[in-house]
Amino acid sequence: MSKEPTAHQLSSHRLKLNYWDYGSNGKPGVVLVHGGLDHGRSWDWVAASLLDDYHVYALDLRGHGDSAWSPGAIYSVAEHVLDLAALCDVLGETPLTLIGHSLGGVIALNYTGTFPDRVKKVVAIEGMGPPPTHHSQKDPYPDRMRRWIDQVRDIERRVPRAYTDINLAVARMREANPHLSEEVAHHLTVHGLKQHADGSYGWKFDPFVRAWPPYGFDSTQARTLLERIECPVLLFRGMESWSTDPEKDGRAKPLRNYRLINVPKAGHWLHHDQLELFVKETREFLAVSESCVAEKQIQLEKAV
């Protein structure tokens, strides 16, 4: 990164949240929303590629990065959408463009369905939420409640892992995503760690964000929000990811105007794994008019 972003704080739900301002005043606003166990600085390369034409911001979700941990350790989609709404209100610009990864994509799409007039375009990287086969969709509610309670109790008993050396944490980062280069993994790790009083390092995210809430990912509720989205949506999926194809499993069906790009040689974090392709397709999508996006989608549907 040639230029460090500026950190700012805002209040949402009595929580102090952090967001990063990459600059380019006076240009159209783009808000970047990271995924679970991640942080806003994971977008540094994407932000740098957009600065010539956009004013770029990146939010640290509650319980992540330099934002506060939620009292009671509740991290539902609704609360994350509330926080994104607070940030958008602070920025005071409408309509904005939203780019989200994983949980961040879910948040961006849910916000857009809630406030369709406030969003110009959405880019979602594997952000359609869990597939129909996931336990959050197919298990009865009592089973989901039991699973969440067991997860929380397990986290309470666990001692968070500490690293005596940053390089050990970098190795763990690359273990989670083998596609990462040493340089990218080091950057993500440095901004994702905090140092303890004894000199060791730990991840910034709240361990309780790992627990899967028994509510908030209901497919029926999500469908009603997706159906309300009026703006164009660009979906990305890594072909080496654990995530399934949202067209084949039906999750993309409620969207009126979207295009899906399946990216080879990319996993769940495809904006790191195939940065050049992601940036190229995203910039093209953001640059064209909404009518052109819709026309391209119709052409794709006819081709199929």
Image (cartoon, rainbow, N blue to C red):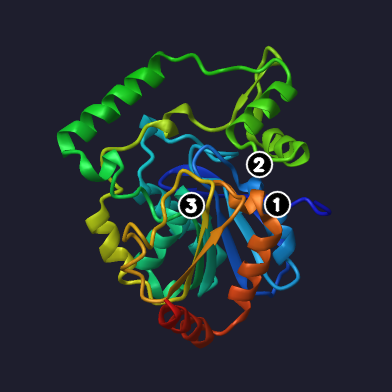
Q: Nearer the viewer, residue 14 or 235?
A: 235
Q: Where in the figure is residue 262, as x and y percent of width and height?
A: 52, 60
Q: Amino acid at mark 1?
A: Asp
SS label for mark 1: helix
Farthest residue to the right: give it. 2
Q: Where in the figure is residue 127, as x and y percent of width and height?
A: 45, 54
Q: Earlier in the sequence, mark 2 or mark 1?
A: 1
Residue that badge 3 annotates? 104
Q: Where in the figure is residue 90, as x and y percent of width and height?
A: 53, 61
Relative to 228, 142 lies left or right: left
SS label for mark 3: helix
Q: Where in the figure is residue 56, as x and y percent of width and height?
A: 65, 62
Residue at image coords 29%, 45%: 133
Q: Which quadrant of the figure contains the C terminus? A: bottom left
Q: Are marks 2 and 3 in contact (CB under 8 Å)?
A: no
Residue that badge 1 annotates? 44
- In the rendered view, would you say 234 is above or below 197? below
The image quarter in which residue 231 lies? bottom left
Q: Amino acid at mark 2?
A: His
Nearest to viewer (mark 2 / mark 3)? 2
Disc on res. 260: none
Q: Earlier in the sequence, mark 1 or mark 3?
A: 1
Residue that badge 2 annotates? 179
